[in-house]
Image (spheres, rainbow, N blue to C red):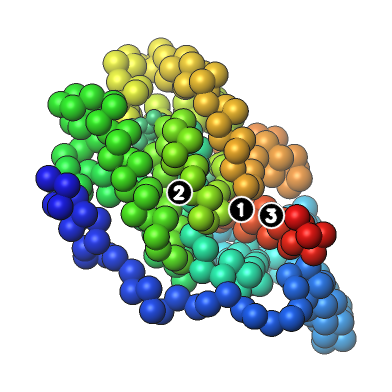
Amino acid sequence: MEAKVLHKLQCPTWIDFEKFPRKSSGSVRFSRRMREEKRLRVLISAQMEPDIASNQRSYDSVKVSCTFNSFSASVLESGNVHAPVDEAQVLKNKSQEIEPYLSGRCIYLVGMMGSGKTTVGKILSGVLGYSFFDCDTLIEQSVDGTSVAEIFKLYGEGFFREKETEVLQKLSLMRQLVVSTGGGAVTRPINWRYMQKGISVWLDVPLEALAQRIAAVGTDSRPLLHQCESGDAYTEVALNRLSTLWEERGEAYANANARVSLENIAVKLGHKDVSSLTPVTIAIEALEQIEGFLKEEDDMAIAGY
Ligand SMILES: Nc1ncnc2c1ncn2[C@@H]1O[C@H](COP(=O)(O)OP(=O)(O)OP(=O)(O)O)[C@@H](O)[C@H]1O
Ligand SMILES: O=C(O)C1=C[C@@H](O)[C@@H](O)[C@H](O)C1
């Protein structure tokens, strides 16, 4: 069984380690170089076209439509002012900006069930040129394609958690991955040891929004939410279950290197609630938070910590 698990985890999507770039040995450090590049970009764009000088996401003055799956964005122009905002372009620029500083480190997305780890993770892996892995899927593959729900039913949660740790251990040996972890992966300290090889990002979504999303798709693949009733009470029951899990896990999620708070994004962009935030918007915020973490890390290194 063990050999089979190993084999399944290595094929067919296993990554060729040789293709991963090594950490840059350039003498210019992250913060300084980022600042210099930014200054240069602002200077150039200010000379070429004042209205596109800033890459900032000020959504108030322009209308951006961004399709969910293809991440293509169309920007309406108002008068002869070119709208500075094109979400897809912002996403691309931001990913290109930070990718060299990741030095091939994996990104681990953590968060409650339904927080968007898979959806946002696929967007991030696409723009960073990383491979995407979903821990739940890898666990299922390692148990002969048995679904997560079936694994819980047949072998119990303890067995599932062991498999989850095995998967994370294997993934921690790899580079250039975006990993969507299971909602409960944060509960085991050993899992953090593996995730610390990369950068962990917490998708912090209000419970009400989670319950709505989950109620919309059902709980078949989420055994810890099973037995939620269907119908009107569904969202409420899901919310109660999620609240209990949240009580147990809230602190554990906060261990992540970076936090993407949907409430904060909504406030920043002037949205009334988080339900109108697209996965691309959230992916951009994730990159910004990762950038913040990289800068902090660099400052600590400079300070000799
Ligand atoms: N920004 C968003 N706005 C609205 N719905 C979203 C958003 N992001 C994801 N969803 C939807 O929410 C549901 C859960 O998303 P997803 O599968 O990406 O979450 P997850 O964190 O990987 O969940 P799990 O850990 O339970 O597998 C999906 O139906 C997805 O389409
Ligand atoms: O929150 C959890 O504990 C879980 C989340 C899912 O991703 C699966 O990993 C499994 O259903 C358990």
Residue 246 falls left or right of residue 142: right
What's under tag 3, amino acid-wise? Phe
First of labels 3, 2 by sequence position:
2
User: Can residue 55 be seen in this snapshot?
Assistant: yes
User: Can residue 239 be seen in this snapshot?
Assistant: no
Q: Nearer the viewer, mark 1 or mark 3?
A: 3
Q: Residue under circle 3?
A: 293
Q: Nearer the viewer, mark 1 or mark 2?
A: 2
Give the vertical position of 163 relative to 38 (above or below).
Answer: above
Residue 68 falls left or right of residue 296: left
Residue 63 falls left or right of residue 120: right
Residue 286 is tagged as 1
Label 3: state its secondary structure: helix
Q: Residue under circle 2?
A: 194
Q: From the Cβ of disc 1, is ligand 1 less than 8 Å away?
A: no
Give the vertical position of 87 relative to 180 (above or below).
Answer: below
Label 1: state its secondary structure: helix
Give the vertical position of 215 relative to 132 (above or below).
Answer: above
What crowding class fits label 3: few (fewer than 14 Cα within 10 Å), some (14-19), or many (20 or more)? some
Picture quarter containing residue 295?
A: bottom right
- Picture residue at 73% right of the left edge, 70% below the top: 30
